[in-house]
Amino acid sequence: MINAIRLSHLVLLLYRKCQVCACPVCACRERFIVFFDQQQKVKVDHLFWIESFFLTAPSLVANSQEGTNSKKAPRRIFSGIQPTGVLHLGNYFGAVRQWVQTQNENSLFSIVDLHSITLPQDPKALKENILKMAASLLACGIDHEKCILFQQSKVPQHAELSWVLSCLTTLPRLGHLPQFKEKSAKMTDIPLGLYIYPVLQSADILLYKATHVPVGEDQLQHIQLAQHLARVFNNKYGPIFPRPSAVVYDESASRLKSLRNPDKKMSKSDPDAKSRIELTDDPDVVVEKCKKAMTDFTSAVTYDPAIRPAVSNLIILHSLCTGLDADRICHENQHIDTAQYKLVVAEAVNEFLRPIRHRYMELLKDPNYLISILDQGGARAADIAQETWREVKSAVGLTVSS
């Protein structure tokens, strides 16, 4: 097994070789990772270390083009969300709330329906879920006049750019992404789309020349893939894409966990519906879910995520819905036990959800209005996408004219 010091020497040697042979740094990196992976001499975490080294050593990649050279790309935000139906509080506090706070004319938020079909979908349910997601985002405060809200599949350049980028991607590079391993672990027939969807995700980002991409920590390596593909393309065809940067919201919102298992994040994919609170849950349903939330054998309301993760998760939820900090919440509820405190949390959640729930129900009554908003957003997104795609086609050599 190669130790870290020897590994760093090998990487530096590789860079010296690149300076001699003038080959693209990224291509050498791929050969480096593939060779040592095949020889089984480098652990997986070492491979991730190599990737981080190549991505975060600007002094060593001075000869590698990063984005649009001397022209600094304008700040543009892109983020996508799958049409899983209605948002839950984990979605809202972990991502959508920040979208609302930062939205402007240079923000694009996409309902990524093409990503959703990497796993089997009922066509009728998918159509309904796209509209439900649009209604959820609007009810949470996304303003379609301030930003661009659109349906991914309405812009065909996503798939077209994805194909170009897939021709620049290697199988080992995709094989090291952890989400594929997690999602395919229990599958016998694994769809190809599940393997290559990170390339489509990169195309989503690069198509709009996004400079900032809000993501969860579990998606960071996918952003590294987008950075890698931007560099590979720019080295091969010329500077078109800026280097996208991940924006990770490091706050308690990203730590909101399942109500039934505090070791897992709140997720729509959890088969236990009581593990999450959806934005459209009736007040009685919210009370029932809070009452069924996991706690422990200590009755006092105290905040200690390491020792009391389940109770601390309820306090985080309470804090997010009210704006109160954990110390104040514990002080105000020191006279009650955790069973009674669950009802306090339920009341706070219901108060927070009331206007969102009302707005969502109103929007869902008018599906044509929702469709028109997605159409308008799709047209605005297409204006940007078509220009980028023209640049890509010209650079790659796909544009033939008389």
Image (cartoon, rainbow, N blue to C red):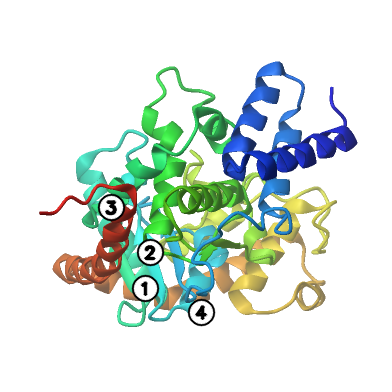
Residue flagged by tag 2: what amino acid is it? Tyr
Where on the picture, by quarter, is residue 197?
top left
Inspect this view and state whether residue 116 appears: no
Q: Mark 1 sits on what residue?
A: 139
Residue 393 badge: 3
Q: CA distance from mark 3 to mark 1?
A: 39 Å
- Say which label, 4 or 1, has the lower sequence index: 4
Question: Which of pointers 3 and 1 indicates the residue nearer the eye?
Answer: 3
Q: Mark 4 sits on what residue?
A: 101
Where on the picture, by quarter, is residue 204?
bottom left
Can you give x and y, in whole percent of width and height, for residue 251 in the image?
A: 69, 67
Q: What residue lies at 31% left-to-right and 52% top-to-bottom?
A: 158
Residue 208 badge: 2
Q: CA distance from mark 3 to mark 4?
A: 36 Å
Question: Which of pointers 2 and 4 indicates the residue nearer the eye?
Answer: 2
Residue flagged by tag 4: what amino acid is it? Gln
Can you give x and y, in whole percent of width and height, for residue 295 in the image?
A: 72, 51
Assign a secondary structure to mark 2.
loop
Q: CA distance from mark 2 to mark 1?
A: 25 Å
